[in-house]
């Protein structure tokens, strides 16, 4: 099982003083909590990544717009200067 090494499971099954069923239930409860936390972390990370992609696309659009605007204004100013 993930999360625990083979040594732990060998130890848990070799001792008669330990109820393997209780050990397994405890392990599964802990695993459930960890998986719930991991799922929430993954969802938050996915949202942040989506926002970062949108901001990157928006930044590119603004950069292109500003470059075109600057070129237009400089070109228009040059024509007025020549006339």
Image: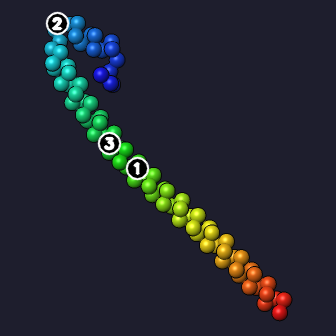
Element on which disc 1 rests: helix
Q: Coloring scheme of the render?
A: rainbow
Q: CA distance from mark 2 to mark 1?
A: 46 Å
Q: Is residue 49 above or below residue 83?
A: above
Element on which disc 3 rests: helix
Q: Quadrant of the C terminus?
A: bottom right
Sequence-earlier tag: 3 or 2: 2
Q: CA distance from mark 3 to mark 2?
A: 36 Å
Sequence-earlier tag: 2 or 1: 2
Q: With 22 as the anchor, is 37 left or right in this view?
A: right
Write the residue at 71% across / 76% down: 71
Q: Quadrant of residue 16?
A: top left
- The location of residue 44, given as percent across then percent down, is 37, 49
- The location of residue 33, given as percent across then percent down, is 26, 35
Write the residue at 30% across / 14% down: 8
Q: Is residue 8 above or below residue 45?
A: above
Dot 3 crowding, Cα within 10 Å, few <14, some 14–19, many 20+: few
Q: With 81 as the anchor, is 16 left or right in this view?
A: left
Element on which disc 2 rests: loop
Write the residue at 18% across / 24% down: 25
User: On the image, numbered disc 1 is attached to which residue?
Assistant: 46
Q: Is residue 81 above or below residue 74?
A: below
What label does residue 39 carry, if any? 3
Q: With 25 as the anchor, is 74 left or right in this view?
A: right
Dot 2 crowding, Cα within 10 Å, few <14, some 14–19, many 20+: few
Q: Residue furthest right?
A: 82
Sequence-earlier tag: 3 or 1: 3
User: On the image, numbered disc 2 is attached to which residue?
Assistant: 16
Q: How many marks?
A: 3
Q: Quadrant of residue 20?
A: top left
- The location of residue 6, given as percent across then percent down, is 33, 14
């Amino acid at each position: 099982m993930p999360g625990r090494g083979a040594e732990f499971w060998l130890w848990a099954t070799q001792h008669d003083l330990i109820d393997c069923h209780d050990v397994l239930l405890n392990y599964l409860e802990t695993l459930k909590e960890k998986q719930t936390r991991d799922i929430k972390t993954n969802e938050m990370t996915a949202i942040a990544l989506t926002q970062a992609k949108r901001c990157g696309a928006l930044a590119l659009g603004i950069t292109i717009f500003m470059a075109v605007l600057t070129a237009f204004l400089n070109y228009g100013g040059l024509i007025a200067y020549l006339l």
